[in-house]
Image: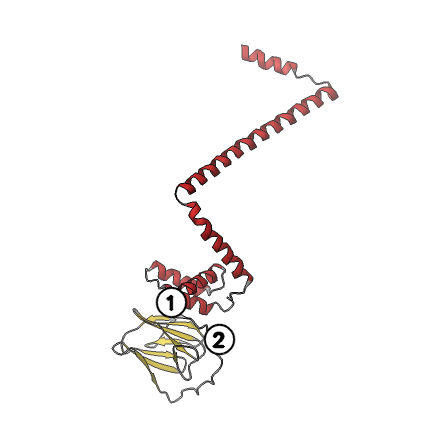
């Protein structure tokens, strides 16, 4: 993958609009990662498009031609080309290719905390369903879109701590230990359920007895006839 755009990208294009393009070599395609300038491939507007040799890519005031035989992008000079934009300090993230695993973890945290671009996340979900997932490209694009993601963010620190705890406890959930732990947990849950029901029945019975005693002493109500009728009907 090659990043095209302003300072900080793999290929810096003079006069390029604000934003960034990603060009993949396999399969050959171009993706607009950020920026409001319109992207067109062979005259058709698209945020993402497959490429073929000889196709013209227009991005704002910049035009390029994709050549499959020679993996380069040549800029076509235009008469009304906008003047080069003055070099500004780049705000783009600098990715170290030696930290692939760490970048993937950061991207996962950004997605989990809803700090990444939702449209980008949805597009990568579709890519996964199409079985064309590229973990490194996904991590770079997600982190590029997650402008609010910082490692000192309290949310990131708290979520990473819970993730570490999950890693620590995961081995205890597998194998014989995990099975026995689940059985004990289910047994305890069953015992607790029975105990709760028994307590409920005792409380309900006590309330009924208290009501019967109050009715007996306050209104002189007698329940003997009721019991005799029940016993007599049962004998019959």
Quadrant position of the N terminus in the picture: bottom left
Name, please, the residue furthest toward the left: 69
Q: Position of residue 22 (x, y in %)?
A: 37, 73
Residue visible at 45% across and 67% down in the picture: 143
In three-dimensional space, the C-alpha distance between marks 1 and 2, rounded to whole angstroms, equals 19 Å
Which residue in the protein does label 1 denote?
Answer: 137
Q: Position of residue 209 (x, y in %)?
A: 65, 23
Q: Position of residue 89 (x, y in %)?
A: 49, 80
For label 2, the crowd category at 10 Å Cα-Cα, with few meaning under 14, some 14 to 19 and many 20 or more, is few
Residue visible at 62% across and 25% down in the picture: 205
Q: Nearer the viewer, residue 111 or 152?
A: 152
Which disc is residue 91 wearing?
2
Q: Residue 129: name its quadrant.
A: bottom left
Above or below: residue 220 compared with residue 171: above
Q: Position of residue 47 (x, y in %)?
A: 39, 71
Q: Nearer the viewer, residue 87 or 159?
A: 159
Mark 2 lies on a secondary structure that is loop
For label 1, the crowd category at 10 Å Cα-Cα, with few meaning under 14, some 14 to 19 and many 20 or more, is some
Above or below: residue 108 compared with residue 27: above
Residue visible at 41% across and 68% down in the picture: 140
Above or below: residue 236 compared with residue 31: above
Mark 1 lies on a secondary structure that is helix
């Amino acid at each position: 993958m090659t990043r095209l755009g302003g300072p900080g990208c793999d290929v810096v294009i003079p006069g390029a609009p604000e934003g960034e393009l990603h060009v993949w070599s396999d399969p050959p395609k171009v993706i607009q990662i950020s920026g409001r300038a319109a992207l067109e491939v062979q005259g058709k507007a698209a945020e993402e498009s497959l490429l073929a040799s000889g196709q013209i890519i227009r991005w704002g005031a910049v035009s390029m031609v994709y050549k499959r035989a020679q993996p380069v992008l040549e800029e076509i000079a235009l008469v009304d080309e906008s003047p080069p934009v003055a070099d500004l300090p780049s705000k783009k993230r600098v990715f170290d290719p030696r930290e692939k695993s760490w970048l993937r973890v950061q991207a996962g945290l950004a997605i989990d905390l809803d700090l990444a671009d939702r449209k980008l996340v949805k597009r990568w979900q579709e890519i996964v369903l199409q079985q064309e997932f590229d973990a490194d490209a996904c991590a770079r694009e997600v982190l590029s879109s997650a402008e609010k993601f910082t490692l000192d963010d309290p949310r990131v620190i708290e979520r990473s701590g819970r993730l570490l705890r999950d890693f620590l406890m995961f081995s205890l959930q597998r194998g014989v230990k995990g099975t026995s732990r689940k059985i004990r947990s289910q047994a305890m849950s069953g015992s607790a359920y029975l105990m709760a029901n028994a307590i409920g029945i005792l409380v309900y019975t006590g309330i009924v007895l208290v009501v019967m005693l109050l009715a007996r002493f306050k209104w002189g109500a007698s329940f003997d006839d009721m019991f005799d009728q029940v016993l007599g009907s049962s004998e019959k």
